[in-house]
Amino acid sequence: MAGAPLVLAILVAAVGVAAAERGGGKLRQGYYEQSCPRAEQIVKDYVERQIPLEPSVAATLIRTHFHDCFVRGCDASVLLNATTGGGEAEKDAAPNLTLRGFDFLDRVKALVEQECPGVVSCADVLALASRDAVGVIGGPFWRVPTGRRDGRMSIKQEALDQLPAPTMNFTDLLASFRAKGLGVADLVWLSGNRYN
Ligand SMILES: *[C@@H]1O[C@H](CO)[C@@H](O)[C@H](O)[C@H]1NC(C)=O
Ligand SMILES: *[C@@H]1O[C@H](CO)[C@@H](O)[C@H](O)[C@H]1NC(C)=O
Ligand SMILES: CC(=O)N[C@H]1CO[C@H](CO)[C@@H](O)[C@@H]1O
């Protein structure tokens, strides 16, 4: 039970990198070295302090990270609220109704903002916090290049169209994963995580 979400974390991180790079900016290790040197440590410290108190959030973060990357790349669009212009956001789509951990991310982001206002993207905070949280619950460590840009668009219909539905048969599920450069192994790991 514990193994699956941990391995999928690495897969999701890899997909995340690919998806974010499609979005434009080049990701690299230590992107904030100059602009916000303590950013990664702030995320890590908070996660290490909090996750032992709310360990189930670790799996939630990976799932949120996955849902984010699957729609519009890893741009934190899953975290956006519906705009005042009306229309519903990705998080309003049925699959997002089961995502938790938004509050946790808001808290981590607030700490990073306190240190360096407007520098570190929410997408990077989500990617880093997911990695660090998996580490706290005994999972592996993987490198998270940073430099993701946050999106400004979050559209419910895109989440509905692109996230694999729980009612899909295997053929359709695999097609959905293949469309994002994922394969059978990714499908198995990520589906296992659904029930965490
Ligand atoms: C979305 O709305 C919630 C509740 O009003 C708020 O706490 C959160 O900070 C908002 N998130 C963003 C990204 O604006
Ligand atoms: C899977 O579902 C799709 C439509 O949802 C259908 O067209 C297809 O025949 C199904 N495939 C199998 C193997 O059941
Ligand atoms: C976890 C979470 O934030 N879920 C939200 C999904 O969208 C509905 C509708 O906007 C919100 O009420 C939930 O809070």
Image (cartoon, helix red, strand yellow):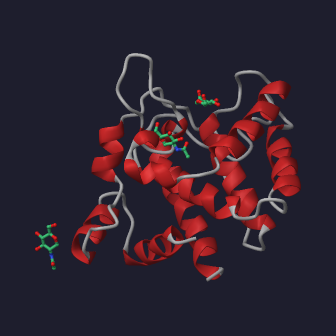
Residue located 32% across and 42% down the image: 158
Q: Residue at x 83, y 26 (%)?
A: 114
Q: Residue at x 42, y 40 (%)?
A: 92
Which quadrant of the rendered structure holds the C terminus? bottom right
Image quarter in which the N terminus is found: bottom right
The number of numbered badges drawn on the structure is 0
As drawn, 189 above or below 78 = below
Q: Is residue 170 left or right of residue 126?
A: left
Q: Is residue 146 visible?
A: no
In the figure, residue 35 lies in which quadrant? Answer: top right
Res 124 → quadrant: top right
Image spot of residue 117 (x, y percent): 76, 21
Percent from the top left, x then y, of residue 65?
A: 56, 52
Residue drawn at point x = 77 percent, y = 27 percent:
113
Res 63 seen here: yes
- Which quadrant of the picture is home to ligand 2? bottom left
The reply, left or right, for residue 14 in relation to residue 54 is left
Residue 165 drawn above or below residue 152: below
x, y percentage for residue 152? 47, 26
Toward the top, the furthest residue is: 85
Q: What x and y, as percent, mark residue 46? A: 84, 47
Compared with 190, 66 (above or below) is above
